[in-house]
Amino acid sequence: MNSNRLTRYILVALVTGVATGYVINASVNADQAKEAAYYFSIVTGVFLQLIKMIIAPLVLSTLVVGVAHMGSGGAVGRTFGRTLAWFITASVVSLSLGILMVNLLAPGVGVGLTLPPADAATGLAKKAFDLKEFILHIFPKSIFEAMATNEVLQIVVFSLFAGVGLIAIGDAGKPITRGLEALMHLMLTVTGYVMKVAPFAVFAAVASAIAVEGLGILIVFGKFIGGFYLALAMLWLLLFGAGAAVIGVPNILRLARDIREPFLITFATASSEAAYPKMLESLERFGVPNRIASFVLPLGYSFNLDGSMMYCAFASIFIAQAYGIDLTLGQEIFMLGLLMITSKGIAGVPRASLVVIAATLPYFNIPEAGLLLILAVDHFLDMGRSATNVIGNAVATAVIAKWDTGEEPVETILQT
């Protein structure tokens, strides 16, 4: 299935899923709609399971091989430093823009919805941020356990050590490198097979969400949803603008075109993880060297969640506005710093953004029950924030590729 054909199939599946979900929602009762959504979720679940099957061996093989091909530990350190600098800057921009836009648009002021009691339970498991636990969780006790549970960050840590080790042992490590290269090509081939299921998963995911909630929920929460997507659009412009400043306008436009498939898959399934293998393939097709794409992208999935961070800030202040709680500038700056830290530990956590928000609200005396206001539309918001994570990581990877290759013309770099 070529690239353009897959994109068309995904778009058709997206539109058909909306129509099917609307018909189901309008023609059956709530229980029957939930039953239909249950059966649709089987298709989506199979696709996501297949993706999870690929991710651990793909991340391990591509990252170890990428590091080994960098040639020296110093090169690895420089690339890591540049990557971290971009991620921190992007995080600050995402959070700041989210806080700015929610204050300008004020979607929670006079929200007109029935507020839940301040002591109502949200059903979300949460606990305070623990620095020791966060740091220890980064380092794997066993690479086999990390791969079995798809702990991407732990796989990244092991792969960095293994890649640098292969550099150190020189020729003795070449058979291992060749074996991992074969594994990488195998996983990319399997990815091509799995992507044939993507249009069906997109149809099922969208139809399921619309069947249960209906399109009417988008009208009820229109100001909040519209404000958030406007903020996301502003962030997309900033990300692409920053990327264009580094790699040039023609290349950033080509990048936007090349990542349309992982973007659409992520948007429809509300899962960044679902697009990881296709994202890696798209970046390499764009021209990013494998050693850079396989290094930056896994780190981005743990540390560069631009859309999710914006949502945490936007939704937290929306809830405060709904309860009539005015936050000072100092409190909002403190919220930015707090979310900078807590959002870095959410990779792989179910409904991660909601968990982070639930842990953040008590610091500002905002009722945690306010989360109940946004639970009904969280899936539709998750679609946008997950797709934004894809854009952020694509731009970051292309920029690091340009920086890492020195002073050569960008056209030469991106075709290397």
Image: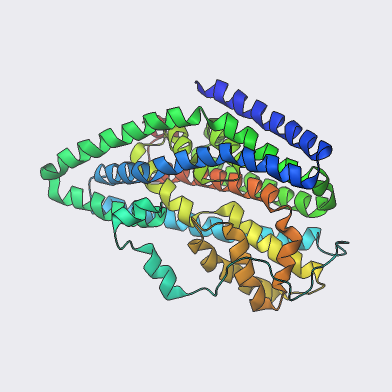
Is any part of residue 202 visible from this angle?
A: yes
Q: Which one is nearer the viewer's eye here, 87 or 404?
A: 87
Quadrant of the image containing the C terminus: top left
The picture quadrant where one finds residue 101 is bottom right
How far across and how far down the image is residue 415, in percent? 40, 29
Is any part of residue 317 visible from this angle?
A: no
Q: Is residue 321 left or right of residue 405?
A: right
How far across and how far down the image is residue 77, in percent? 31, 56
How far across and how far down the image is residue 183, in percent? 29, 36
Q: Residue furthest left?
A: 172
Q: Residue at x 74, y 42 (%)?
A: 33
Q: Is residue 11 left or right of residue 328?
A: left
How far across and how far down the image is residue 144, in percent? 30, 53
Instruction: Please determine whether, in this image, residue 38 is positioned above or below residue 409.
Output: below
Q: Which one is nearer the viewer's eye here, 28 or 321?
A: 28
Q: Residue at x 59, y 64 (%)?
A: 355
| Total numbered badges shown on the rendered structure | 0
The picture quadrant where one finds residue 145 is bottom left
Q: Is residue 363 left or right of residue 342?
A: right
Q: Residue at x 34, y 43 (%)?
A: 57
Q: How is the image coloured?
A: rainbow
Q: Which one is nearer the viewer's eye here, 367 or 338?
A: 367
Q: Residue at x 53, y 46 (%)?
A: 272
